[in-house]
Image (cartoon, rainbow, N blue to C red):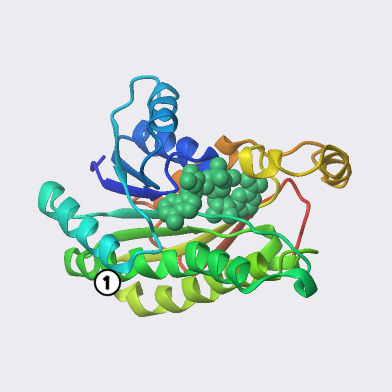
Amino acid sequence: MTQRIALVSGGIGGLGTAICRALAHAGHRVIAVDLGGRDERVAGFHAALDGLDVSFAPLDVTDFDACGALVARLEAEHGGIDILVNAAGITRDARLVKMDKRAWDDVLSVNLDGVFNLCRHVVDGMAARGHGRIVNISSINGQTGQFGQTNYAAAKAGMHGFTMSLAREVARKGVTVNSISPGYIDTEMTRAIREDVREQIVAGIPTGRMGQPDDIARAVAFLTADASDYLTGVNLPVNGGLFMSF
Ligand code: NAD
């Protein structure tokens, strides 16, 4: 197996941590990037990795130039980034009539601009080397819409339009671009949902449980494998059957 260099944004988050672990287990060198200034969270992240060799670098994905500088540094250190997983994300829920401009801008800028900012800087190198795997973590709510989430659903649906377009642009260069649409996964993000609403959501999931971060991490490992080279422009729903479509 070829060892690949993997960059995971939102890397110390609930899904990010599981994704870093899965990619490290697959034999890759993994660099997690996430907002800086949170030493305690980074320490918890390393503790959750059971000694796996994953490094951390602070990065705000909304900062285009900072993304460029980090990618340039990692390329110089490691020779190139082969796998990019865009998992940085935030929610700022409110019905549209109550949504302020800030809540709209913040969600679009982390969830969607962040994907552009990192992809824009890694894709040339991937294409030049003839190999690359990009996975964008979207959401079931980008597929179905969700009350109080015009901002988040727009960003997550937009992410898949981006995925399909970039997939077409780089398919001949050995670079695949896919998205994953998780359903409700047990992380900080969903622990913020009111208990009674969570119970209602779980009752509607055919498998009868919320997803675990490893459910998503396994899908990332699959899409980023060298052998998954005929799979591109796909949105892979991992949602326990909550939303089925074809
Ligand atoms: P999380 O809050 O645990 O992790 C998100 C991470 O993104 C955090 O570590 C946060 O610090 C980081 N982040 C936020 N703003 C950033 C910025 N500007 N620059 C860099 N990093 C930033 O949430 P999660 O559940 O692990 O979510 C990961 C991804 O999966 C998100 O994109 C989320 O929208 C998506 N998602 C999650 C669920 C779920 O049920 N948990 C469902 C569907 C989609």
Residue 152 place in picture, x, y as percent: 64, 65
Q: Residue at x 37, y 52 (%)?
A: 227
Residue 223 in the image: above or below residue 172 = above
The residue that disc 1 covers is 173
Q: Residue at x 82, y 45 (%)?
A: 205
Residue 190 place in picture, x, y as percent: 69, 43
Residue 163 place in picture, x, y as percent: 48, 71
Q: Quadrant of the C terminus?
A: bottom right
Tell me the amino acid under the disc marked 1.
Lys
Foreground pick, 86 / 27? 86
Residue 45 place in picture, x, y as percent: 42, 30
- Left/right placement of residue 111 relative to residue 144 reads left
How many other residues sit within 10 Å of disc 1, few (<14), some (14-19) or many (≥20)?
A: some
Foreground pick, 80 / 207? 80
Q: Secondary structure at mark 1?
A: helix
- Left/right placement of residue 142 relative to residue 198 reads left
The residue carrying mark 1 has its beta carbon less than 8 Å from ligand 1: no
Foreground pick, 174 / 210? 210
